[in-house]
Image (tube, helix red, strand yellow):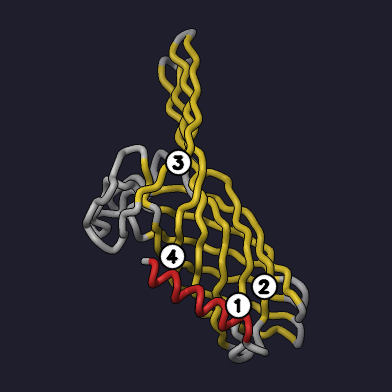
Amino acid sequence: MKTVLTGFLLILFSSFINADAQIYLQGGLNLANITKTNDGQTEKNNILPSFNAGIMGRWGLSKELDIETGLLFTGHGSKAETYFNGGNDYVKSKFNPLYIQAPLNAVIKIPLDKKSGIFFHAGPYIAVGIGGKSKMESKIGPLVSSSTKSIKFSNDDPFTSQQDDAAYDKLKRFDYGLNFGGGFEFEHLILKANYGLGLAKINSTEGNNSQNNKNKYRTISVSVGIPLGK
């Protein structure tokens, strides 16, 4: 995984030194969730608002086709609320892990005029967990309790079935998946929507990613990009 990350960084920096490259700052809203069913649905989970922010670059291959990569500080996770006893008692939990993510997208651009156009993008991403919080609140009768813990990460390799340093209170440090999306590009503004389809089980006790589609990230992002220099 470290070798893959190094390769992404080399691609990133090579795109930034290209004379025709377009560099832009990106920031926006994440609507994060996690799958709960074998077929990859997010039933009985609630969307967790989070964020994405970072720097992206396009190689400038042509007016119709490009390659895009970068580094994003991004949040994933989910929240769940369970009510019982007529709705008087409850258990509420949410976890918001934070990652450094490196996407690599192919971009198809359709010009509308000399200064604007629409685009579609798709490609893989890899990510490294760096922090985050897990919170739980419960009420049973007159008893109310809450707790907040820092998220712990194991060093499991998502491409193998080995479970190094696994535990129920940890997430896998490495995630990977696919991005799909598109948006509008103007002279000084990029509007982008993205769907992140996680392919790795993120619980550190889960080793076989192909067994089913439980415990994988599903994240919708809406972002604004500000081009630098061009």
Q: Quadrant of the C terminus?
A: bottom right
Q: Amino acid at mark 1?
A: Phe
Task: From the top left corner, tell me how far across and down residue 209 is, in percent.
Answer: 27, 57
The residue that disc 1 covers is 119
Distance from Cα at disc 1 to Cα at disc 3: 36 Å
Distance from Cα at disc 1 to Cα at disc 2: 6 Å
Against 114, residue 196 (above or below) is above
- The residue tagged with tag 1: helix, strand or loop? strand
Badge 1 density bin: few <14, some 14–19, many ≥20, Cα 10 Å: some
Distance from Cα at disc 3 to Cα at disc 4: 19 Å
The answer to which of marks 1 and 2 sits earlier in the sequence is: 1
The answer to which of marks 3 and 4 sits earlier in the sequence is: 4
Task: From the top left corner, tell me how far across and down residue 92 is, in percent.
Answer: 47, 28
- The residue tagged with tag 3: helix, strand or loop? loop
Q: Amino acid at mark 4?
A: Ile
The residue that disc 4 covers is 126
Relative to 213, 52 lies left or right: right
The answer to which of marks 4 and 2 sits earlier in the sequence is: 4
- The residue tagged with tag 4: helix, strand or loop? strand
Q: Are marks 4 and 1 in contact (CB under 8 Å)?
A: no
Question: Residue 151, labelled with which disc?
Answer: 3
Distance from Cα at disc 4 to Cα at disc 2: 25 Å
For the point 61% across and 59% down, the residue is 222
Q: Are marks 1 and 2 in contact (CB under 8 Å)?
A: yes
For the point 40% across and 64% down, the residue is 177
The residue that disc 2 covers is 184
Q: Amino acid at mark 2?
A: Phe
